[in-house]
Amino acid sequence: MKHKQTIKVYRFKLNPCKKEVTEKQNKKKEKIFQTINNIIMNLWCGILVTLIVIETVICFNCDKDARECETSLIIEQRISMVHQYKGVYPSKGALYYVDVTNTSAAKPVDPQEVISLDGWEKTWLVTVANRSLPGPPIIVYVGQTLIVHVINKLHSDSVTIHWHGLPMKGEPYMDGSAFVSQCPILPGQTFTYRFRVGLEGTHYYHSHIGNQRAKGVHGPLIVKPRGENINIKEHIMTIQDFNHEWGIDMDTNKMQQGWFDKREGFKFIFSPGGVPLTGLYVTSGLINGRGRYHDPITNKHNEAPLTVFQIEQGQQYRFRVIGAGTGFPFRVSIDNHKLTVIASDGYALKPVQAESFIIYPGERYDFLIDANQTISNYWIRGEIVEMDPARRVEAILRYVGATIEEPTTSKHQCSSNNRCVVVNCPNSYYKETAYTDCVTYNQLEAEATDDPAPVLEPGKSHNFFFNFAFNLIPFSVKSAISGKSFLFPSVAALSQPKEITKLCEKADCGENKTCYCTHSIDVDFGKTVQMVFSNHGAGSLTHHPLHLHGYSFYVLKMGLATYNETTGMIMGDNEDILCPGGSNSFCNNPTWSNSSWTDGEIPGLKLKSPPRKDTIIIPKGGYVIFRFIADNPGVWMLHCHFKNHFTDGMALLINDSFSRHPPPPEGFPVCHDYPRMYKPPVTTPTSSAPTMAPPMQEGMYTRADYWLAVGILIGIIAILLIIITYMCCKSTKKADTYKT
């Protein structure tokens, strides 16, 4: 069984003759017509989806009993604050056409039909899937095969789609990483992703080329267990930072070339503890694509519409939260409601009740709330994690029966008698007067008790040690991992490995140097891989959310920087890590300060019920240790999920079990420079006899074969069209919609 979305087909009028027939004849011929029509429409859908106009899919929820789920994502550019060719403006939580002067007497514009962003009235260009930001949720069940036709309707840009959180086991060519698992999808092209969904949980899809994800190409991907009947109601929430002035391309180039605006240089935003957060510009936040611009001087907002989550008193709800942002983490809370964190990145956790949690770009958190408050409206708050929170995003939690108005509730005030618990802190403490307790991710435990960390055995394991940092080179700052700033190959690394020309083995890399190369490491099938990622040295500036493709890893330990318990301010780097070049070096070759830890005998590892994840914070001045078993042959990216850090080079490739890589799918696209740098070896004839064309092999066809097939196809279509034309002249019925 296959489940596709509903497709609306706009057909030409095929009954121009209007010939009268009897009712009996009409029914008989109508039945024949409908049968032939169904055959034709299935043929059209199967041959070329662009022959029909596909109605925008708001949400694709696959049938639970289907084996295959098929849908489409159309990637194109749209502009904000426009509806049916007319501009709109925000007022009192609604949108109105720009020519409306009396909003009390006018009907508001449906906000579902407008990309409103933060209500900024100057139209803003976004790149989106299916004309919505975020893109439509895709909801499937474990074990189903998901087929997604990605149609690139951009005029100037290529695209790929990465299925963030899914391991793609056995199907590495479907991972969606540009120049790693595939060549980019060029303007006008279609690429069909087909893979088996194997990991339940809250995930998402997003563009994986350049900075395109930050421009709007992302959407929820929810995988539910197939065999369970879970009656709990759910809401999906994406949260992201938004910049309506510069844009991520400008931010990235400012970091690389010089950061000046109106004669002002680089200015850091600081997170709690005095840790630099970023120098990126941010104007607001969005929850499910909506937010408000708050004037930084007056602190007044522009009354733009917000996302509303409706709940019923007495029920319990699961919220699936996706960190879809670019360079800012958010602290999420709901007024008057406790949050019970139950899962992250698709893996269940032992429940932890909290006032709030922190979510970084690429992370996902699931929490429960009990609708046990008075029927009313309550603020959902997403505060950008700064020392003095000012920039924020709100949404509305509305009980059934509540009046349609904005909340008047207040944020919970932490006190000595009612302290706040914050899950997923990258720091040890808040200042003493904040009355806030931090729970780092490694303090959480997996709900599963039968999933211990893999064992690290001599000769059957790999042990890697890398440092995340910004290497300060003349006139620029380069994002790097252990001194290597990642350079994308000009080919798809997985399917064209011999054509990669700038591997780091050939580069001039070393302590206190920065080299530019395609950084990759090799791992062998079946071995345990232990990775230690530190954030030390002169280039340690901020926390980094690290994302690994192809795997969910076991988080064994997090070591944090030293913090002052009273002020909550950072004091220095964690002393477990040694930088051979000294504290003022880039720390390109970090080691353990205690040499006895080198072979993996590290104290404090959580080997029983460790939490699992695919995106984890590497804290400034600290480190993270995780493990996984190399059992997924392919080439997998590992990179910082802050968009400009990744684009700037904070990435590497894991070449997993090279000899076991599956062959590319038939007809899989290739890409390369011109003239081609790599040339396949030429076989030299062993005799002076003239060379001959190779014999025909199974699966090989001549040009004549193809033309014969084309001729047959054209003939079949012509016959069918004649039959349809004949039948249409005798029928007056015209179908409007067709469901596949």
Image (cartoon, grey):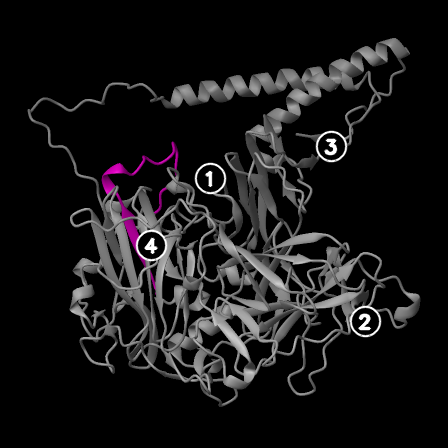
User: What residue does disc 4 label?
Assistant: 607
Given the image, on which type of amino acid does mark 4 rest?
Answer: Leu
- Mark nearer the viewer, 4 or 3: 4
Report which quarter residue 29 is drawn in. Answer: top right
Where in the figure is residue 213, as x and y percent of width and height?
A: 51, 59
Q: Tell me if residue 575 comes above or below residue 352 in the rendering.
A: below
Q: Which mark is residue 92?
A: 2
Q: Which residue is mark 1?
A: 198
Q: Amino acid at mark 1?
A: Gly
Residue at point 24%, 19% (across, down):
695
Label 4 residue SS: loop
Question: Is 650 inside the magenta-drawn segment?
Answer: yes
Label whose residue precedes the other's in the sequence (4 or 2): 2
Foreground mark, 1 or 2, reads: 1
Magenta region includes residue 221: no
Q: Residue furthest bottom?
A: 263
Q: Residues within 10 Å of mark 4 (few under 14, many from 20)?
A: some
The CA distance from mark 1 to mark 3 is 39 Å
Q: Does residue 478 appear to the left or right of 309 in the view shown?
A: left
**Span highlighted in magenta in the image:** 649-672
